[in-house]
Amino acid sequence: MAKKKMTILDFQKFKDEGRKFAFCTAYDYTTATIVDESDVEIILVGDSLGMIMLGYDTTVPVTVDDMIHHIKPVVKGAPNTFIIGDMPFGSYNVSPEQAIETANRLTKETLCDCVKLEGGVNMAPTIRRMVDAGINVMGHIGMTPQTATSFGGFKVQGGTPESARKLIEDAKALERAGVFSMVVECVPSVVAKAMQEEVHVPILGIGAGPYVDCQVLVTQDLLGMYGDFKPKFVKQFANVRKVMVDGLNKFHEETLSGEFPTPEFSFNKAVEIPAVYGPGKN
Ligand code: KIV
């Protein structure tokens, strides 16, 4: 039986009832169909696609067109899963009007269920305007990859009492601005716990420990597809890369040995092929 597509109200109910949920990424149709078949409640088409699908070193070069190109097939492949479209760097930091225009485009052209953007207190006025314009917004604070160079790279945030307090203020500002939930990335577990207790909307943690409402991981990381790089917070629940390399090597081996294709994998209809006669032919 197909799973039931969740709504923003369901996620709030889960938080209120203390029920956990999970979300992962997808950037293409096939992966979206696989996640849709699983019990995972949310798919994020993240701008992490810049690194995972396009081979960039950071998420910064990703464009709105890139996002639309990847969100559309995911929406098609996962009709029973709530889908977040990520807003890439430079597509919302100019003005609230720019943010609303980008969010409108992402939503209208892909039919994703909400948009996500990075930033805390600094982005709260923009988020308020977006929410007032009827857009479903998910926040993203803590380690924010789009601006990671400003704090020295992909590092744990909120490690001092002052920075922890600042993160909690970011979370409260996002809640007041009207986000329906927020991603909290790479913060000590106790800080995420304090955020979880001080705000009422769901906290979706990636590298934020066990006390949050929802766990987030990049699918290629959790399935063990993405080479040797593995952040500390990633648990590999499968080794799909090995399964894929083994499968490719078996295909190569059987091609070379002639074991593939057998009649089972060939079109075996007998066809009488007439000889070709004519000038220059015999
Ligand atoms: O782009 C992404 O994959 C993300 C997750 C790390 C939450 O924003």
Image (cartoon, helix red, strand yellow):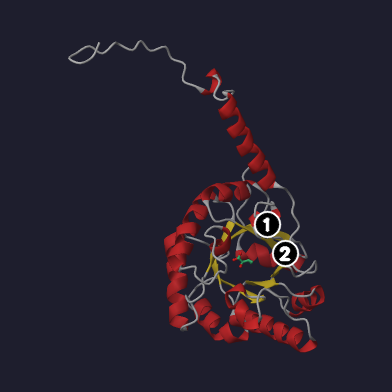
Relative vertical location of residue 18 with respect to residue 151 in this rendering, above or below: above
Q: Earlier in the sequence, mark 1 or mark 2?
A: 1
Q: Position of residue 271 (x, y in %)?
A: 38, 12
Identify which amino acid the numbered label 2 is placed on.
Pro
Please name whichever residue, 72 or 173, is drawn nearer the observer in this view of the structure: 72
- 63 left or right, relative to 246: left
When asked about the image quadrant of residue 248, the answer is top right
Please name whichever residue, 18 or 163, is drawn nearer the observer in this view of the structure: 163
Q: Residue at x 74, y 54 (%)?
A: 236
Q: Residue at x 51, y 55 (%)?
A: 75
Name the quarter where the N terminus is drawn.
top right
When asked about the image quadrant of residue 165, the answer is bottom right
Any mark on residue 221, and which? 1
Q: Position of residue 140 (x, y in %)?
A: 63, 74
Any mark on residue 231, and which? 2
Ligand 1 located in image quadrant: bottom right
Residue extending farthest to the left is 279
Identify which amino acid the numbered label 1 is placed on.
Asp
Q: Position of residue 122 (x, y in %)?
A: 58, 86
Q: CA distance from mark 1 to mark 2?
A: 9 Å
Mark 1: C-beta under 8 Å from nearest atom of ligand 1: no
* Secondary structure found at label 2: loop
Please name whichever residue, 123 or 245, is drawn nearer the observer in this view of the structure: 245
Bin the neighbour count of mark 1 within 10 Å (Cα to Cα): few under 14, some 14-19, many 20 and up: many
Q: Position of residue 21 (x, y in %)?
A: 71, 60
Relative vertical location of residue 240 with respect to residue 159 in this rendering, above or below: above
Q: Is the Cβ of the residue at disc 1 closer than 8 Å to that at disc 2?
A: yes
